[in-house]
Amino acid sequence: MTAQPNVLFISLDTVRADVAYSGKYPGVERLRASGVSFTQAISSCPLTPVSHATVFTGLQPPRHGVRHLFREALDKRVPTLAERLSAVGYTTGAVVSCPGLNQWYGIDRGFDFYDDEIPLLPDGRDPLSVGDVKLRGLALKRAPLVVERATEWLRSLDGAGPFFLFAHFFDAHWPYEPPEDVGVEVANPYEGEIAYTDHYVQLLLRRIAELGHDLASTLVVCFSDHGEDLAGWYPNDHAGDLGHPYEEGHGCLLFDATQHVPLVISGPGVPAGMSVDSQVRLVDIMPTVLDQLGLDPLPSDGASLTEFFASGNGPSREAYSETYFPQERAAASDDYPDLKALHAVRADGRKVIWEADGRQVWAYDLAADPDELDGRVLVSDEDA
């Protein structure tokens, strides 16, 4: 029986697709040159725990059970990718770097090693007790420590079987204060944080190779859980004075600024340097990994992406997104009591966004209006 390849997941938390694919970041470009870039990948939710739960279960939020920032843990009846790989002999380890991936959520299931240590907030509070998305960003494990902990874990392995490593980088999250200049020309501090992260992603890849693991024989999946709305730094922003003052980076809206994310896959059986422009989803990641490893599929809301590897073409897939964070935002402050959960479907160059109670529905023609600035109101309060 052929030995199974090692598997490496790299999560670039809070990284927009347009910035990730700008050509500025050598680490991302190296991965793109060695694999397949999906230029139209869509996230299921603009919240870290919800989106990662989708990645690791192949299920949309209504089926895996995590729908708010800090209300639900992963449904214990739902199998995870780490559990599946562990069952077939993989040694599994994760180094995560923010409150949104704390073991409380249950996303650690199946990992032999799960390092979710993060500092307290500057005021001494436990970040898990804080619902403010921006404030929680002050509690993070910086990229150098992610690489150090991941390297230590890899060194501890006895080499008896393949490994599955999940390395999660949170540096691009607010506040945008890159600790060092890594020599990449950037337009703003947010891009500086991504350059800083990219620098340490490259270091992680070098460390893995130095430990004797062939990267060309490693199945690598690099993705972001959601993007970021910078309130005017980019043409498709909507936050702050652009009409949605309650949006602080991500969480409350379902525009492409937060839902359009990078996804790059490389490794055995994956063509190098291919770009796929068909729309896909993060929910497709788990089925793809199981398919590439020759493992039996699990029930999923996604489907393997291997159909694109032959020619780079294939039918675009309807993408569902949701966010229930507006409910938490409304409950936490008297400033925005009318915020409601949102759902969206993106398909065939169009997007429809609607409030969960159906009282407001908007439609966007993404070909004519790529920045989603001129939505057509299909249903309003007056019609409901």
Image (cartoon, rainbow, N blue to C red):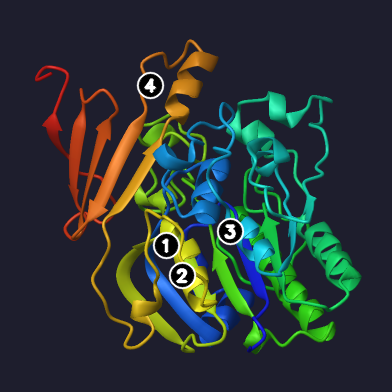
Q: Residues within 10 Å of mark 1 (few under 14, many from 20)?
A: many
Instruction: Compare marks 3 and 4 and give the one earlier in the sequence.
Output: 3
Residue at the spot of label 1: 284
Q: Could you say which is closer to the camera, residue 216 or residue 38?
A: 216
Residue at the spot of label 2: 288
Q: Could you say which is closer to the camera, residue 61 or residue 225?
A: 61
Amino acid, disc 4: Leu
Q: Nearer the viewer, mark 3 or mark 4?
A: 3
Dot 4 falls on a residue whose secondary structure is loop
List x then y, in percent, for residue 339.
38, 21
Q: Nearer the viewer, mark 1 or mark 3?
A: 3
Answer with left or right where residue 108 lies relative to residue 370: right
Identify the residue at image location x=43%, y=26%. Answer: 326
Res 24 quadrant in image = bottom right
Q: Would you say residue 21 is visible in this rendering?
A: no
List x then y, in percent, for residue 321.
36, 45
Q: Establish if 248 lies above or below 131.
A: below
Residue at the spot of label 3: 81
Dot 2 falls on a residue whose secondary structure is helix
- Cβ atoms at labels 3 and 4 below 8 Å apart: no
Answer with left or right where residue 263 lies relative to residue 363: right
Amino acid, disc 3: Leu
Instruction: Compare marks 1 and 3 and give the one earlier in the sequence.
Output: 3
- Cβ atoms at labels 4 and 1 below 8 Å apart: no
Mark 3 → mark 2, Cα distance in angstroms: 11 Å
Amino acid, disc 1: Asp
Mark 4 → mark 2, Cα distance in angstroms: 36 Å
Instruction: Compare marks 3 and 2 and give the one earlier in the sequence.
Output: 3
- Cβ atoms at labels 1 and 3 below 8 Å apart: no
Q: Could you say which is closer to the camera, residue 52 or residue 46?
A: 52
- Cβ atoms at labels 4 and 2 below 8 Å apart: no
Answer with left or right where residue 361 lies relative to residue 15: left
